């Protein structure tokens, strides 16, 4: 085959991808939107709730009449898939949704490495991808990110930045023992922590790395406490977070120092005895009970969202259930603003009208696909069994009270640092 002839199939393939993304199933008055989450594998504890949040948004949009594009009304159809917490499976399901199901946009992502794989696939296909989970910071770098991919949450590095700034500036910590899991999320969190600590003179720290899936962390915790820290900074995730907080109680760590968890959520807090979280402070991207917070708009929006979810599921939503819901809502808003399902036009429309409001309060999209929130994270303190009360859902979900908020500049990196 000649060089000229070999180019033709490649051009045809590229045009086919463009045609798939730019041509929704308008003939049936339906727009298909892909939802891809970890419904099995290690991410299932979070992914199942994420899928519920995405479907809830689709149902609400359809109940309100659907989405208006160019003066014509369309219903949404959710095409749901399980990525099994595996990047290769996610890519296969992504391709199937786009090629065989003709989805217009994809909303999803439970674990960071899966979202990174989907970002790469989006870059190849030219599609629209809205990540609704925590991702590695590289996701946002100009040389890495697809031009039509966004993330409505944050990066692990940012959780480390926010935690470091809060522990030193507000808690006045001078000695910090970093108790970190020896894998991606721990390394990302620690990287962000270091970036802030280097600019905090007089603050020292020691890092204790623990292996993933370790059932007994006692020896690691003892080593951390031997440093005599002002704060024990726990970066453990998933089942490791449950073990770390349980064993911190057993070793009496909370009586010797203040414990601060980098990123609390329901799945961790409800999986341990109430005494194990009593007095523990930590960051939360969002909490389902915002009553008592001093922003009436945020309280109202959070209450409305939580009430809707509890009515169907009998328990409050996880933070990533909320972000999945708004991930769909923002994807559909992009279609409305653009008057189109063309990914580039959708992305440009959000950049031209970046501000929006949800259960987390005022938010604004940035050119790099980052969402900047007025309230980066809330600082909560864990409740013991004697303080837990709820007239709306099981008492185990009334596990924290909001004591502060972090809204400083340390949390989100500059555009320049990301290559823009």
Image (spheres, helix red, strand yellow):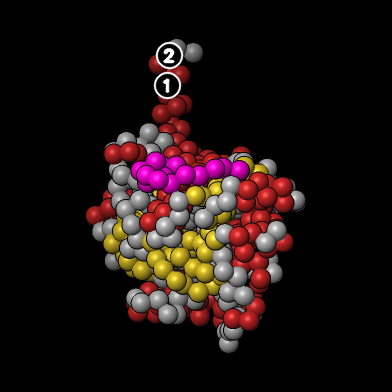
Residue 227 position in % (x across, y down): 58, 47
**Picture quarter containing residue 70?**
bottom left
Q: Is residue 78 left or right of residue 150?
A: right
Secondary element type, mark 2: helix
Q: Is residue 114 left or right of residue 286?
A: right
Q: Quadrant of the C terminus?
A: top left
Circle 2 Cα neighbour tier, 10 Å, few/some/many (<14 / 14–19 / ≥20): few
Residue 97 position in % (x across, y down): 54, 49
The disc label shown at residue 3, or none: 2
Q: Is residue 416 left or right of residue 81?
A: left
- Viewer-nearest residue: 163 or 356: 163
The disc label shown at residue 341, or none: none
Q: Is residue 197 above or below residue 172?
A: above
Q: Is residue 204 above or below residue 364?
A: above
Secondary element type, mark 1: helix
Residue 146 magenta: no
Rendered residue at 39%/79% (across/down) = 300
Tag 1 residue:
7
Rendered residue at 51%/62% (across/down) = 282
Alpha carbon separation for disc pair 1 and 2: 7 Å
Residue 283 position in % (x across, y down): 48, 61
Q: Is residue 30 visible?
A: no
> What residue range appears in magenta?
194-208
- Viewer-nearest residue: 278 or 317: 278
- Cβ atoms at labels 1 and 2 below 8 Å apart: yes
Outermost residue, bottom direction?
A: 391
């Amino acid at each position: 085959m000649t060089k000229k002839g070999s180019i033709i199939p490649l051009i045809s393939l590229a045009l086919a991808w463009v045609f798939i993304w730019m041509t929704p199933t308008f003939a049936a008055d339906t727009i298909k939107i892909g939802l891809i989450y970890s419904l099995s594998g290690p991410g299932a504890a979070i992914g199942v709730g994420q899928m519920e949040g995405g479907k809830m948004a689709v149902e609400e949009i359809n109940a309100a009449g659907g989405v208006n594009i160019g003066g014509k009304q369309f219903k949404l159809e959710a095409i749901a898939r399980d990525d099994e917490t595996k990047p290769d499976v996610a890519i296969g399901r992504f391709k199937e949704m786009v090629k065989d199901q003709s989805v217009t946009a994809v909303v999803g992502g439970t674990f960071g490495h899966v979202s990174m794989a989907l970002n790469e696939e989006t870059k190849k296909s030219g599609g629209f991808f809205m990540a609704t989970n925590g991702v590695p910071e590289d996701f946002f770098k100009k040389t890495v990110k697809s031009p039509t991919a966004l993330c409505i949450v944050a990066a692990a590095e940012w959780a480390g930045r926010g935690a470091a700034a809060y522990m030193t500036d507000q808690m006045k910590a001078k000695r910090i023992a970093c108790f970190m899991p020896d894998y991606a999320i721990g390394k990302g969190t620690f990287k962000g922590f270091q970036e802030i600590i280097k600019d905090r003179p007089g603050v020292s720290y020691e890092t204790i790395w623990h292996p993933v899936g370790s059932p007994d962390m006692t020896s690691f915790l003892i080593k951390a406490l031997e440093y005599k820290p002002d704060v024990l900074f726990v970066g453990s995730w998933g089942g490791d977070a449950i073990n770390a907080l349980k064993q911190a109680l057993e070793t009496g760590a909370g009586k010797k120092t203040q414990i601060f968890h980098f990123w609390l959520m329901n799945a961790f807090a409800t999986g341990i005895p109430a005494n194990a979280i009593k007095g523990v402070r930590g960051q939360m991207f969002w909490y389902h009970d915002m009553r008592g917070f001093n922003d009436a708009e945020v309280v109202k929006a959070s209450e409305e969202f939580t009430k809707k979810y509890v009515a169907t599921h009998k328990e409050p939503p996880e933070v990533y259930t909320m972000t999945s819901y708004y991930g769909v809502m923002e994807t559909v808003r992009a279609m409305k603003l653009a008057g189109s399902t063309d990914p580039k036009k959708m992305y440009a429309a959000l950049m031209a009208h970046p501000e929006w409001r949800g259960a987390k309060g005022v938010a604004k999209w940035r050119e790099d696909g980052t969402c900047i929130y007025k309230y980066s994270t809330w600082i909560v303190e864990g409740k013991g069994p004697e303080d837990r009360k709820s007239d709306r859902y099981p008492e185990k979900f009334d596990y924290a009270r909001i004591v502060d908020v972090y809204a400083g500049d340390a949390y989100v990196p500059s555009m320049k640092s990301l290559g823009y």
